[in-house]
Each structure stands twice: as structure tokens, then as C-alpha cells.
Amino acid sequence: MPVQLKTLIPLFAVFIILFLIARHFLIPDSFGKYGHYRANSIDEIAALPINYAGKAVCIDCHDTEAELLASDAHAGLSCEVCHGPNAKHADDYEIKEYLIKQGTREFCGRCHSLNPARKIEVINQIDIKEHHPEKENCIDCHNPHAVWELKE
Amino acid sequence: MEHLYEILKHVDGFIYPNEIELQWGILIILYPYITGLVAGAFILASLERVFKIKVLRPTYHLALLTALAFLIVAGLPLVSHLGHPFRSYEILTTPQLGSAMAIFGFVYLWYLMVVLLLEIWFDYRYDLVIWSNESKGIKRRIYKILTLGVTDISPKALAWDKKLGYIITVIGIPSAFLLHGYVGFIFGSIKANPWWSTVLMPVIFLLSAMVSGIALVMFLYMVVSWIRKVKIDMACLDEIGKFLFMVLILDFTLESLDQVHRIYEAEESFEILHMLVTGKLTYTLFIFQGLMGTIIPLLTLGFFRMYLPKEKLRKPIYFLVSCLVLFGVFFMRWNVVIGGQLFSKSFLGFTSFKLGMVGLEGFWMALVWMIMPFLILSFILWLLPPWKKHSEETV
């Protein structure tokens, strides 16, 4: 055997063995229990704070709005789509820091501004600049919980 | 939520919310770019070694060391993009064999440990032994360690160096093809993206890698010669130019074929891709990649096949061509990586990309990763100068 290989082969073998030893210690205990990931991560993620309360929780208190909403085109939307994540508010009614009640042209325009790539049969769209410019915000006329009902 | 309004101004038509911001920025452009330079430089080196193109001898060691310097950096843009360097070893300790991306660690290690380091070691072993006896201080100690204790320089041992080095190079050629074909496969196998999903992608990546690698060695050979104030071997430079021309033709043909195929098939994604190419990618695709990076070098090198101007004129032109090719291939990667993320998967709209200067995904960060291999190469050239090798005359 050439003199080079007499050194290289043991050297590579040492590398591989060291790697395998390191691997043994580096792999987390719960790795591979359910699949190709650390099983403990499920509990860790589950323990993270929750941001969204979910529609069912909102409805518990805000039943009037929920009833209105269910009767119209926004029935499919969840409350927090427009109002923002409010799990804290659900726990404590007084906390309203993230609660959104805007109804500005830009806010509603995120879905309803005219966009040729958006299907008009699915989402009603208007030109947010041209549509009744004398009014400031959409909610001056429209009730977002009952969208076809115009305010006086 | 206010920041959304600002971002939405950069969106045209309809796109899905998660497509507004590009997830893969300039660091992901550098990854295939630098990896390609490695594969290309190595393939140029192997032309001399395996295919016995003797005229390329002056660039053989330079090409090998260039490949090593760039390979050391190749994975780092990825690590810096992912932002968790202390977790990066997990790609090796818990390999997910079903994922092409997760195999990178092994493709990389194979190429670094089994191909490049071994080939350079076999090639330099004789010199390392001599240098470890001649030099003093810390350098002597480094050379001693690099010999790995194999100090036998009998003709028999040296013959083995040659033989084993040759075997490694032969293994190295398919490995170099594998390394960069693999990078192309990462993009080509993403079936949800019509701009990437083509079986030609690995081949195109490989050929453009060879183009860029050859151009890089050409560039470095000229720069290193100027710094060392030695005469450039014009026969060698002409030969590199010839190979660059050959590979450039293949690369250009295949990339065109890919586009022609796309245009003729005109699948449902064609309209949006047509808008992409004629809109957001006009400059980077037609001017930077096509005209500057491909057509001008092709015409120049093609003209050199018919008529060779004087050396004084040829040198700056070769220099310019190598810079243009390097520039063009960078924008080829740009067009693939950025282009593929600019249009919506709904095929109904576009987002936009603006390269920031600062930040972990910005221009300066990319520049750091791009300068790094040149610094490493300077160090390697200082430690293992090809022009001071003894084996050239004696073996």
C-alpha cells in the first residue's frame, strides 16, 4: 500500500468516527419520535402565547354583530380578519390595544379597491378615489357587519 | 398593519399575501454563482490533468486553488441568509434524505474533502515536504502539519502521488458536474414555479458554471500575472479563450433552446412569463445577461478564432471579456432567483424587488461574501504559491 494511503485512510476513518460520536451527542433526545423533527418542539410551540381568539369566542359576547354578519356577504369572514388579533381582549374585555375599528378607504380597499386581476363576481370592487369623494371613510355610509345596509 | 399599505404600492395586479416579499434575495443569488465558479474552475483544471491539454499548464494550480477558495465560501451565503449559524451542523447530523436541499451538506463535503483537498494535497505534497525543511518559524510548522506526516519523497512515493492525484481528478470531474448540476436541480425541480421548473435547468446551470469558472480563472491569471509582474503566457490565454468560446456557444444554445421551447409550448404560464421578461427583467435579462454577458463575448471570442489581433490589443480584450462573462453569469443567477419570485403563482400579478444596501440581506453583506473568496485565495497563494513549486522541474 502506498505510504500516502497509510496516513489518509486512518485519518478519514478518525474523521468519520469523530463525526459519528459528535452526531450521537448532538441529536436531541426526542428527535424522530413522530417523524423527522424534535418531538418536544410540539409542546414548546403549543406553549407559545396565542394571538387570535377565534370567531367562536368573539360570538360569545358580540352576538348582535355576529347575527348581522351571518346574514350578509361578509358571513364567511372571521372577526379578526378586520379587527386584528385580539386574544388578549377575549381574556380581559378592558384590553383594547390592538382592536381596529377603522373602516377607512385604504383599509376596506385592501379587498375592495378596483383590481383587474381580482374577480369582480367574487369580490365587489370600486375605485376608492372616485367612489363618493364627498365622504371621508367607507363606514360613513356602509355598515361592515351588514354590508348592503346603507346608513342615512 | 400600516406598513402593508406602503408595500402594496409595489404590487401590480393580484398576488397572494405571502408573495409580496421575496424570501430569496441576493445571498441566494450568490450561492449558485459562487458554487458555479468552483465547478467551472475545477473543470478547467481537469482539462489539463485528465485531457492532457498541456498549454493550460500555467493555470492548472491557480484554477485548483481558486476552486478551493471559492468552495470554502460557497455555503456561507446560505448560512448567513438562514440566520442561524449555530444550527447549521444539523444538516449533517440529521439528514433528511427525501429533501434535495438537505443533501447539500453531503454534496459539499464530498467535493471539499474527497475531491479538492485531496487533489491539492497530492499535488503539493512533495513541495510541502521541501518547504517544511526550507522555511522557518510559523510557516515551517504549518507546512509540517499540512504534510500530515507523510514525508517520504522517494521516486516511488512521488509516482503514487501522481497516480492517486490522477484518480482523484477523474472522480472529481463527475463530482464537479454533480455539485453544480445539483444546484440547478434545486431550482429545476420546483414544479410549482414555471420559470424554474424545466429539466434543462441542471444542464444550463452546469454550462453557465463552466463559463463563469473559466472566465474567473482567465481573469485571475491575468491579475496575478500583473501583480507578480511576469509575462502572461499568451498561448495559454488563447487556449482558455477557445474553451470559453466553446462552452459559451453550448450555454447560449441550450438557454435559447429552453426559451424557444417555452415560447412554442406557450403553456398557461406563458402570458405572465412574457410580461415578466419584457417588463421587470428587461435590463437584467436582455442587456446584462444576453447582450453584455453572452453576445458581446461570443462575437469577440468568435472573431478571435478567425483573426488574432496583436498581443497588446488581445490582452485587454480578454480581460474585458472575462469581466463581462462574470458579470453576465451573475445576472443569469439573478434572473433565475429573483425572476422566479416576482410573479404570482396565480399568474395574475407581480411583486417587486429592490436591493437594499444595508442589513443582513443587503448589498454590503453580499459584497462581503463576494470579496471573502478573493482574500482566502490571496492567503492560499501566499501559502502554496504555484510559481514556487519544485515539482515542476524535478518530477
Image (tube, coloured by chain):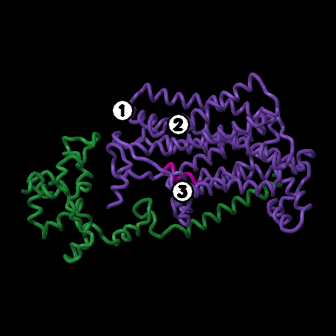
CA gap between label 3 and label 2 equals 22 Å
N-term mark: 3 or 1: 1
Observer able to see residue B164: no
B203 lies left or right of A79: right
Q: Position of residue B344 (x, y in %)?
A: 37, 43
Q: Residues within 10 Å of mark 1 (few under 14, many from 20)?
A: few
A81 lies left or right of B79: left
Chain A shade: green
Q: Position of residue B176 (x, y in %)?
A: 65, 43
Question: Which chain is depicted purple?
Answer: B
Three-letter amino acid code of the residue under disc 2: Leu
Image quarter hosting the C terminus of chain B: top right
Query: Label 3: which residue?
Result: B357
- SS for callout 1: loop
Q: Splitting the image into 4 quarters, where does residue B175 fall?
A: top right
| Chain assignment, label 2 | B
Three-letter amino acid code of the residue under disc 3: Met
Magenta-highlighted residues: B97-105
Badge nearest the viewer, 3 or 1: 3
Considering every residue shown, the one lying at the far top of the view is: B306
Q: Are marks 3 and 2 on the same chain?
A: yes
